[in-house]
Image (tube, rainbow, N blue to C red):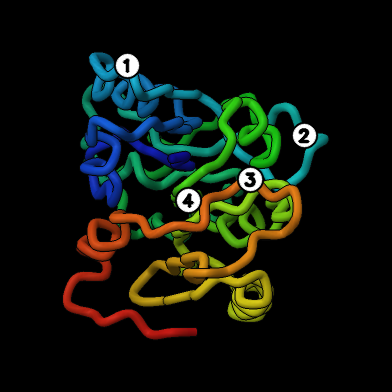
Amino acid sequence: MIQLGSNDGVMDDPVHRIVRQPNVYSILVEPVPHVFDRLSRTYQSCARVTCLQSAVVPDEETKSIEFFFLRPKDGLFYDDAYSGWSSTSRDHLEKFRQYVRNFDDLLCSEMVPCVSVNHLFEMTGWQSVDFLQIDVEGLDVSIVGSLDFKTWMPSIIRFEHMHSDKASLFALLLRLRTLGYHTFSSGFDTACRVACGMRLPRGAKGRNRQLALPCIVWSHKSLAGNAPDQA
């Protein structure tokens, strides 16, 4: 499993219980330095988990990027929820100004290393990826769209769509359906699963088999109580 935008591995994390399963190997990616430190501590005793401090971008050329986030400071109120608000776009963070005390004092930016999603997949050395989980505050649709599906075909893809424009989201969903995915959108997120019995594209690295993961995915509170609507 690969998770992009892992935060601390606990707070509002839809895959924490999956990562903890004894037969799951995971790569967890988080770019914000102080949040990454917490993520590393969460899984420091789990040999099956690799934590990577990096941003993930759609293109292959960008090697580092300015990243905006809210950093705790002595004497100023800081809610743990603030750690979930970070982005390559300052304008995106401005959307949360009304919810953050001392927004201007907490806001900061750093240059962070970044990697494309395709290069990240290659770095794993794995033959296939069963589950790709994405929550990257607005770049989700672009990152899924940049995946080389001729080479990689994750059995399940789950991403946050709430910050994406509808036209780009619908175009991606149509493309995923032509590739053989069933797509379901509910709440803030969209989940995609390879249809049973589908023939993978020649050369694509994936597994055409039943997985026990969706029952856990759909238990996330953002989807609780909502039957997924097929797109």
Q: Is residue 229 above or below residue 42?
A: below
Q: CA distance from mark 3 to mark 4?
A: 19 Å
**Looking at the image, is 106 positioned above or below residue 74?**
below
**Cα distance between the residues tagged 4 and 1:** 22 Å
Q: Residues within 10 Å of mark 3 (few under 14, many from 20)?
A: many
Q: Say whether disc 3 or disc 2 marks the residue closer to the N-terminus.
A: 2
For marks 1 and 2, the one nearer the N-term is: 1
Residue 84: tell me if it is visible.
yes
Q: Earlier in the sequence, mark 2 or mark 4?
A: 2
* Residue drawn 79% across the image and 38% down it: 60
Q: CA distance from mark 3 to mark 1?
A: 24 Å
**Amino acid type indicated by mark 1:** Ala
SS for dot 2: loop
Which quarter shows the N terminus?
A: top left
Q: Amino acid at mark 2?
A: Thr
- In the rendered structure, the answer to whether residue 28 lies left or right of residue 145 reads left
Report the side of 13 relative to 152 (left or right): left
Give me the C-alpha separation between circle 3 and circle 2.
25 Å
Give yes or no for contact between labels 3 and 4 (Cβ–Cβ under 8 Å).
Answer: no
Q: How far apart are the two marked residues, 2 and 4, measured between alpha carbons?
A: 19 Å
* N-term mark: 3 or 1: 1
Q: Earlier in the sequence, mark 4 or mark 1?
A: 1
Q: Which residue is mark 4?
A: 134
Q: Return the residue at label 1.
A: 47
Q: Quadrant of residue 123?
A: top right
SS at mark 4 in the image: strand
Q: Kindly identify the amino acid type of the residue bearing the numbered disc 3.
A: Lys
The residue that disc 2 covers is: 62
Residue occupied by mark 3: 205
User: Alpha-carbon neighbours of circle 1 within 10 Å: few (<14), some, or many (≥20)?
Assistant: few
Helix, strand or loop at label 1? It is: loop
